[in-house]
Amino acid sequence: MSLKQSDIREILESESFKSLVKTRVTVSLTLTFIMLAVYFGFILTIAFNKELLAVKIGEVFTVGLPIGIGIIVFAWLLTGVYTRWANNSYDKRVRELRNQILNR
Amino acid sequence: MENFQTTLGQANLTSIIIFFVFVAVTLVITYWAAKKTKTTSEFYAADRSISGFQNGLALAGDYMSAASFLGIAGMVALKGYDGLIYSIGFLVGWPLVMFLIAEPLRNLGKFTFADVVAFRLRQKPVRIASSVGSLMTIVFYLIAQMVGAGALIQILFGLPYETAVIIVGLVMIAYVLFGGMLATTWVQIIKAGLLLTGATVLVILTLSHYNFNITALFSQAVDKYSDAVLSPGGFVTNPWDAISLGIALILGTAGLPHILMRFFTVPDAKQARKSVFVATGFIGYFYILTFVIGFGAMVFVGQEAIIGVDKGGNMAALLLSEAIGGQLFLGFIAAVAFATILAVVAGLTLSGASTLSHDLYVSVFKNGKTDEAGEVRVAKIATLCIGALAIGLGFAFKGQNVAFTVGLAFAIAASANFPSLLMSIVWKKYTTMGAVWSIVTGAGLAVILIILSPTVWVDIFKNPEAIFPLKNPALFSMTAAFLVGIVVSLMKPEKEAQVKFEDEKIRTYLGIGAE
């Protein structure tokens, strides 16, 4: 598909495109930050206060067990959150913008 | 249970049969794929015909190496909870791949991640630098895989090391050479299916001994050893070490060339995103299974018996299979482990071949001008070269302690490939020289620092004290790569690249003009 340079400029400078990029960057960075905070929070907890994760819950299990497994599940759920957002909200706005462009 | 005798090391008929069936089936698929592998897009990217779900499984198949199956299960069996901490590090890179990399990569690139780094910069210098980072990652990863393959098959099938390395090399070359990405993808999908099934059955068999009461398994482990198996042990002691390793694992995952390459096999960004969701789910599930398998081995086989077979504990999962499922099941799991290695080295080889042909030969030596048939031919020659290199590396490093090479591969991926990829996607003022110096710094520092680290300087060279204190260099090499990239870019702006950055936004975010 060949777009005229002037068309591209117009799209790039449109408010709808700018807000799309901004939302996307915000969502990506927020989720990235959450994932890193959870992981390094876990690692640093172990580094500085191992005993915290060794606290028993019930007869056998330690707190560390549900937390460790929980982080694995959480990481997956987080990719689910992003996928849901992107499929429902982001893709819709991308489609609208693309249609605008292609129907010129 | 107390005097568990293993038959590991003797030829196991079941595993030989299952392995031959696997090779036969995958070669038939390769034959089918070969007929659909004529153009460059077919050879490198399966003509972008792979669905998000299929690619998710293939990504999982590419990532779950024998090292993670056998190594992590072994670590859990010997160290308990620490093995879980280690496996978590391998998983949390995936969400970042999704949030930061997958979609822009798919929209901007064609066959390799260097396509994206070089997109708006001067082709030649960036392609050469990216290729260096890419090939270094692949070679160090290959060393670990090939040496592991030789040793593993020696133990499993009683085959000589060299024979094993040659078999792995030849079968893998056949997949890639004739079937390109399509065959490689299906090998990875089948292998992922086998591995997930095998691990699931192993967990079910283990838990069936406790009427599926998982607490009973863990409580027996605690009784047999101590409370400590369910608490963090010595794995994380120095916080800087832990952070540095974490960075290598997380950002390295987002910089592995053979993983990144898989995103070009799907039709669009939406499917790229879906494939990460699927891959993360399967890999996470697999690590949870591995944790249970490790505890199963701890209880049923016992740590002493595991160490008796292999000091590193790598045979724990296989010993458990035998203890619980007998010869037949051991044969199945052993064949799966073999298939696992084949699938991973096939992915690595294809990725290395595409770097040689697409990034170096076509973009650097031919200035991007070449015909389809010519490029496919070069890609096939490159496949033979990388395949021969893989076999050669397997021979050269026989009996060496190569455990550090996986950490090094991840450190280079995190320090050379990831920073240049991320900055080229998000930062307008990134320049050609910024990219080149960032990659050189990241890759160079990763190698130099790991040589001076306790991992090599003390463990391998037997020096009393390390010059660089951390076991993994990623914290320093990655930070330095970002800093150098930023400083060099700011010193000498590249106007043209900034203009192109604005124009490419329409492709990055909307997918307009994407391959």
Image (cartoon, helix red, strand yellow):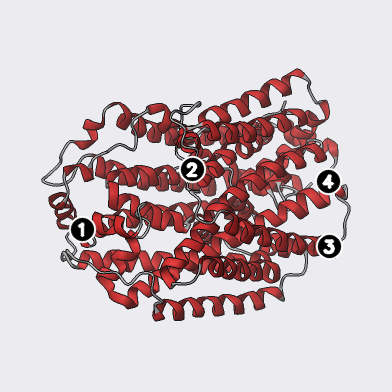
Q: Which residue is mark 3?
A: B372
Q: Residue B145's x, y, as percent?
A: 53, 56
* Residue at 35% from the left image edge and 53% from the top image edge: B311
Callout 3 crowding tier (Cα within 10 Å): few <14, some 14–19, many ≥20: few
Q: Give the letter of the chain under mark 1.
A: B
Q: Earlier in the sequence, mark 4 or mark 2?
A: 2
Q: Residue B108's x, y, as percent?
A: 70, 45
Q: Which residue is mark 1?
A: B299
From the viewer's perspective, is residue B359 above or below residue B213? above
Does mark 2 fall on the same chain as mark 4? Answer: yes
Quick one: SS at disc 4?
A: helix
Q: Give the letter of the chain under mark 3.
A: B
Q: Residue A83's x, y, as percent?
A: 50, 48
Residue type (three-letter) at the residue carrying disc 4: Val
**Gap between marks 3 and 4, in whole Å?**
16 Å
The quarter of the picture where the N terminus of chain B appears is: bottom left
Q: Which residue is mark 4?
A: B364
Quick one: SS at disc 1?
A: helix
